[in-house]
Image: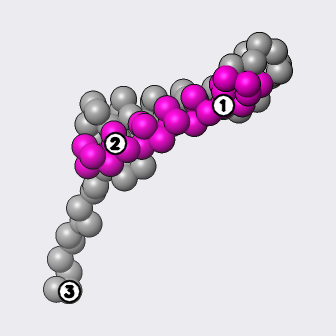
């Protein structure tokens, strides 16, 4: 229609979580990711001893953090976030 001034509808950003569960999932994932990156790894887990199940502590630490990250992603997927 010529002369009509209709504005395009404004939608919220798809990058920001909309629900409380989405905020919890995003915050948890980012916090766990921070634990798997320097400088946190260097300060917390950068050592070989003690050995856990015959694996160096660093490997066990990273295995636990990465499994927790995968757990958050699976939880978010099941919730449909």
Counting from the top left corner in percent of width and height, residue 48 is at 83, 21
**Residue under the point 28% across and 40% down:** 18
Q: Give the dominant element type of the magenta stretch: helix, strand or loop.
A: helix
Can you give x and y, in whole percent of width and height, for residue 19 in the image? 26, 37
1 vs 60: above or below: below
Taking the spot 57% from the left edge, 28% from the top edge, the residue there is 64
Question: Does 2 appear above or below 61?
Answer: below
Q: Which residues are magenta?
A: 53-81
Say which quarter of the image contains residue 46.
top right
46 relative to 74 in the view: left or right? right
Q: Which residue is mark 1?
A: 62
Residue 80 visible (yes or no): yes
Q: Residue 26, relative to residue 2: is it above or below? A: above
**Is residue 5 or residue 15 the one in the foreground?**
15
- For this orientation, the residue located farthest to the front is 54
- Residue placed under numbered mark 2 in the picture: 76
Identify which residue, 12 or 57, lies in the foreground.
57
Residue 70 in magenta stretch: yes
User: Mark 3 vs mark 2: which is more N-terminal?
Assistant: 3
Q: Which residue is mark 3?
A: 2
Comparing labels 1 and 3, the label whose residue is closer to the camera: 1
Q: CA distance from mark 1 to mark 3?
A: 61 Å
Q: Which label sits in the foreground, 3 or 2?
A: 2
Q: Is residue 46 left or right of 70 when viewed as pictured? A: right
Given the current orientation, which residue lies at the most extreme bottom position?
Answer: 2
Q: Is residue 67 magenta?
A: yes
Q: Secondary structure at mark 1?
A: helix
């Amino acid at each position: 229609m010529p002369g009509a001034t209709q504005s395009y509808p404004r939608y919220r950003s798809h990058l920001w979580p909309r629900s409380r569960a989405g905020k919890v999932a995003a915050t948890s994932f980012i916090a766990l990711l921070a634990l798997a990156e320097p400088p946190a790894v260097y300060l917390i887990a950068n050592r070989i001893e003690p050995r856990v199940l015959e694996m160096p502590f660093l490997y066990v630490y990273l295995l636990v953090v990465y499994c927790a990250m995968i757990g958050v992603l699976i939880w978010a997927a099941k919730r449909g976030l």
